[in-house]
Amino acid sequence: MIPYRVSNVRRLGPSRLTAGLDEHRRLDLNAHHKYHDRLPGQTVDALISMAEEVDLRGRGGAAFPFARKLRAVSARDGETVVLVNAAEGEPASLKDKTLLTRAPHLVLEGALLAASALGSREVVVAVGAGELAEASVTAAVAERGLTGLVRVVAIEERFISGEGGALVRAVNGEMGLPPGRKVRSSDSGVYGLPTLLSNTETFAQLAVLAELGPEEYAAVGTVQEPGTILLTVGGSVGAPSVVEAPPGVPLADVLALCEAKIGDGLLLGGYHGTWMSAEAAYGTVLSRRGAKEAGGELGAGIVVVLGEDTCPLGETARVAGYLAAQSAGQCGPCRLGLPDLARAFRQLQDGDPDGPEAVRRAAAAVKGRGACFHPDGSARFVLSALDAFADDVEEHRFHGGCGRETKGVLPLPVEEARDVRLMVDWTRCQGHGLCAHLVPELVKLDHHGFPVFMDTGVPSWLLGDAQKAVEMCPALALRIGAK
């Protein structure tokens, strides 16, 4: 079932989450028990106490205290559900897919431990449809004879699919979009029941904590952040890997382990994270605190390295366009603000002298105004590029570019290379401007009244409007096609 090529795993320090993966491509149940003890049941109070003692935090990016989630769900009357968020919609992250593909029983151990303590009616594992991880965890459920108690739900994987509210809606059979208002899963989640919702790695960490006990668990890491963490290290590196490492080690050690040499900069925390200069990255300590002191966020442990042979502004522009197309399209900052931000950054890349100010204005228009965190995270990512690549910004402003191609070092889904776009026949276009009124998310008018198109695909929620613009164009200059 598992192909020969699987995610490369490396470590600094002890192997906990990755134990046995040197010898096995995938740990079936028998192999899992060679490296991990069978776990006795725990009361919910005991689990809360252990999680508090080591300050176990969620590993999906927000770092929310796991004990608080447990306590909130346990305080509710009636039935509960445990929901494993394995919807790793972030293209630069592989750690959760690696756990479910190669060590699925460790994730199930943690989820079952929590479910037993809470007396939950069901464990739900929400994973990207068609992924290898889906097949692996489904097989693990069958190995344990847990069909009926553990349900694997395959969902459409998008960048925002891992947002808590979007995930709950997808599991409940609705559109997997953020609900637009804050609803705690501990109040109403799967089936409307109180739901313990946490990330794949978090449940694996819970299993390791219960196996080792708080004292041994905290024997590595820092006092504030004990244990180990998983990182996805990619980009311009010789050995792209999922790395298990204890907080407190220099980020430079992780980069050396993966044969990475920073050129222009490093992205920490993924596409809602921040760009760092090479100097800042090499001086950063690997931890939530260390990342914050360096001006970034550790997030879900994503590290993407840029070498010297690709244009950093072009790489940022590619992802900005992707983020705009991946929005839920439910509020103004997403529908209009993110396309404006992507368009402004593309103009900066193309040499617009006023590019930096245009990018800042577009970012200010979306920050703090969205129905979810997607606009804020996207703005943070784009704005950080202005600081980390300040020399390149000036090079593009005064010379129209830096002389380097954009090589696509930052990973995007494969289908983005064949996306559907709104295209114009310039021999026909007469500058009527109707398209900009019908699809302002995709088209703006320049100072001559001619359309300027967003350089990204047409989101699914805009296809109808884009088709209407094609049909209503007075000059018949528009069409929808694949790039």
Image (spheres, rainbow, N blue to C red):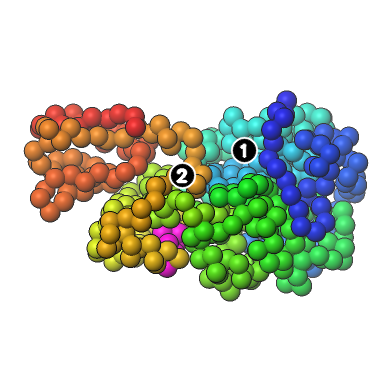
Q: Position of residue 205 (x, y in %)?
A: 76, 54
- Kindly report the distance in space between the C-alpha atoms of the residues bearing marks 1 and 2: 26 Å
Is residue 161 on the magenta stretch? no
Secondary structure, mark 1, is: strand
Dominant secondary structure of the residues highlighted in magenta in the image: helix
- Residue 466: x %, y % from top left: 26, 35
349 to the left or right of 81: left
Going by the numbered disc 2, the residue's amino acid type is Gly
Q: Is residue 222 visible?
A: yes
User: Which one is nearer the viewer's eye here, 132 or 349?
Assistant: 349
Name the N-terminal-most of marks 1 and 2. Answer: 1
Q: Residues within 10 Å of mark 1 (few under 14, many from 20)?
A: many
Tag count? 2
Q: Is residue 29 left or right of residue 459?
A: right
What residue is drawn where x is 42% and y is 68%? 387
Q: Find residue 377 and name its label.
A: none
Q: Residues within 10 Å of mark 2 (few under 14, many from 20)?
A: some
Mark 1 is on which residue type?
Val
Judging depth in this view, the residue of 311 and 368 nearest the camera is: 311
Residue 110 vertical position relative to residue 280 in the rendered view, above or below: above
260 versus 169 height, above or below = below
Disc 1 marks which residue?
127
* Residue named by callout 2: 408
Answer yes or no: is residue 371 visible: no
Residue situated furthest top in the rendering: 1
Residue at (25, 59) in percent of width and height:
352
Q: Which residues are magenta?
A: 380-387
Examine the structure image and report whether residue 384 is included in the region drawn in magenta. yes
Q: Quadrant of residue 155?
A: top right
Task: Name the spot of residue 391 as percent of width and height, x first.
Answer: 39, 66
Q: Is residue 317 left or right of residue 423?
A: right
Dividing the picture into quadrants, the one containing residue 379 is bottom left
